[in-house]
Structure formats: structure tokens, C-alpha cells
Image (cartoon, rainbow, N blue to C red):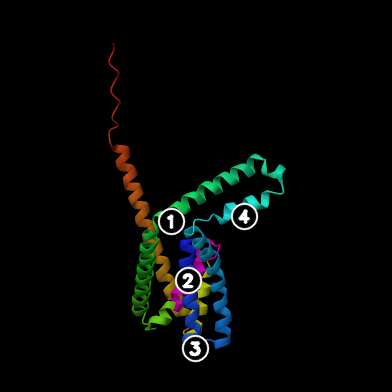
Amino acid sequence: SYELLGNFFFLALGTATLAGLRIVPAGRATALLLLPLILILPPALYLAALLRGRRPISAALVAALRPRPRLRATPAARRLLRVAGHGERLLVRYATVKSRILGQLALFFLLVWGLSVLEMSLALRFLGMRLGLWRTVFVLTAGRLAFLLPLPAALGALELTQIGAFALLGYGPEAALSLVLYVRARDLLFAAAGALFILARGRRDARAPRQRPPANPRC
């Protein structure tokens, strides 16, 4: 819920730039802003409930199964209640006892998104586009929205959202596709580096001599 809250908050910030930059009329920008704000509410309310020591999912499941004793007695329902209860107990314990860590996570979230904005700004300048801070945030938000869609690696969605975002900023599709090419190349580079590391580690472990357990001495 914390990660969802952070992502939706950044989406709301990016949507708010539509009105601030006057890319679309203020009325339409306000209507668009309602969607990420509505998406923010469920994880925000769930996180607030955990901080107060409540377990809303477990309570909702118990309330839903209470008038259905036969369904509640099935192994699947008991397993669902047990898993939900155990998971939320851990979340409540983590949220109440280690609340200071949540503040550290918030700072880490701001750091990560700050570095993402910096990377996007440098990439756009390398491609010959100087968009400014809020336009860069808007472009980054469009890309993040594509990766939140249920598509593998945002295939097609990233290209469409970036073309639309750059069109609103007054650029052609070639500018958007050049940025998408950079994003794809960067992701493939990191994936290839990780795959090579795992492959090299696996070969090294395979070549390492295996130590046999010592034989038990005879009595």
C-alpha cells in the first residue's frame, strides 16, 4: 500500500502540472486530477488504519463470512482468514512499532523520484529538448502511468503515452520515440547486466569444489 500510495501521489502531481502549465483547460485538468486522487484514497486509508492498529481486510472478510457459516467452515475460507489475519498482524506490528521507518521510507521515496526526475532531465537534454522541471515531471508521469498498466514491460502503452505527452507539449512523435528508445535501451542494459552477473555467479559456484561432509567416526 505504501508503494501504491507513492506512485499514485506522483501521478497526481504530474496530472496537476497539466493545469499549472496550461497544457489543457483548467476544467479538464481538474477532472483528470480526480482520477489519481481517487486512486490515492484506498492505500492512504489502509495505511492510516494500520497505523491505528486496525486490520480492515481481516475485519471485512469476517463480516462477509459471518452470515455464511457453511462457507466459513470450508478449508479455503479458513485458510483465507488465517493468511489475511497473520499478514495484517505483521503489518500492524511493523507500522506501529517501527513507525520511524515509515518516515525513512518516505525520504527514500522522495530521493528515488528526485533521481528519476534528474535522469529524465539529463536524457531530454541529451536528445536536444530543454523542457524545464514541471514539463519533465509531466513526461515522467506519462511513462510511469504506462508501466502501471497490466501489460508486459508496458509494450505499446509506453509508446502511446509518450507520444500523447509530447504532442501536448508541442513536439512530434519522433521526439517521443527517441526518448522511448533510450528508456528501452537502458532497461535492456540493466537486465543484461543482471543476467550476466547471475550467469557468472552460477558458473563460479558450479566450478567450486564441493566439500563432502565429514564421515561419522565409528564408535
Residue tagged 2: 9
* Quadrant in the picture for residue 119: bottom left
Magenta residues, start to end: 138-154
Question: Three-letter amino acid code at disc 2?
Answer: Phe
Q: Quadrant of the C terminus?
A: top left
Question: Three-letter amino acid code at disc 3?
Answer: Arg
Can residue 143 be seen by looking at this rendering? no
Above or below, comparing residue 140 to residue 147 in the picture:
below
- Camera-nearest residue between 98 and 127: 98
- As drawn, the label of residue 22 is 3
Question: Three-letter amino acid code at disc 4?
Answer: Ala
Ranked by sequence position, the earlier of labels 3 and 1 is 3
Provide the secondary structure element on which disc 4 rests: helix
Label 3 – label 1 distance at C-alpha:
42 Å
Rendering coords of residue 7 (x, y %): 47, 67
Ranked by sequence position, the earlier of labels 4 and 3 is 3
Residue tagged 1: 96
